[in-house]
Amino acid sequence: MEKSACNMLLLVGCVGVLLMLLEQVSAEQHIVGGKQGWDQSTDFDSWASGRTFKVGDTLVFKYSPMHSVAELGSEDDYKKCDVGSATNSMSDGNSVVKLTKVGTRYFACGTAGHCDQGMKLKITTVSASSSGPSSSTPSSTSSSTSGVTRVSGSFVFFASTLVMSTLMHILC
């Protein structure tokens, strides 16, 4: 490959790596309910309070086969525990929900009676550039008690650089 084409490929690759790094460092994975998970013994109002949920983050619901996750379409459905009108139902025991836009979202357990006993969650997603209380500290490891996993920026950078280096070696 011609030297100028290799340089252009390297430049485009570096910009791509930087963009991936920025996205990965800012996104958080929230394990709903922390180490207890999506369970009747968890106080979800307390768990959610003080946390900032941003566009790009994910919610991870971990639960036993006796539970499920129903995403409800309105605050009224949430207050009434009307899981029959769910906009999305999940029952795989490890459900991941990507927070893609600003706004309030409502979740409840689809098992009869569980929502009425408090097994429900209301979160408000803010823009990725918003600042506010956060449930994690800058760390390269996950914290099982806080229920948040942050992806280490240095790991993402290292892996991306390794891939770019290998591609440059093959193509140039």
Image (spheres, helix red, strand yellow):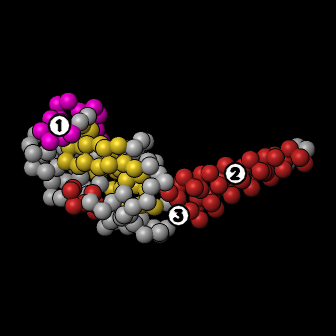
Residue that badge 1 annotates? 76
Q: Which residue type does callout 2 highlight? A: Val
Residue type pointed to by label 3: Ser
Residue 44, percent across and down?
21, 56
Name above or below for residue 21 compared with residue 76.
below
Quadrant assignment, res 81: top left
Image position, residue 95 (x, y; %): 33, 45
| Residue toward you, 82 or 65 | 82
Residue interval drawn in magenta: 75-92
Work out whether 171 lies above or below 72.
below
The residue at the point 62 percent across, 51 percent down is: 19
Question: Looking at the picture, how far across and down is residue 150, in whole percent?
Answer: 45, 61
Inspect this view and state whether residue 57 appears: no
Q: Residue at x 33, y 60 (%)?
A: 51
Q: Which residue is mark 2?
A: 15
Q: CA distance from mark 1 to mark 2?
A: 45 Å
Marks 1 and 3 sit apart, C-alpha to C-alpha, by: 39 Å
65 with respect to 19 (left or right): left
Q: Secondary structure at mark 1?
A: helix
Q: Quadrant of residue 132?
A: bottom left
Location of the N terminus (image quadrant) = top right
Instruction: Name the side, left or right, on which 118 lies relative to 171.
Output: left
Label 1 CA crowd tier, 10 Å (few <14, some 14–19, many 20+): few
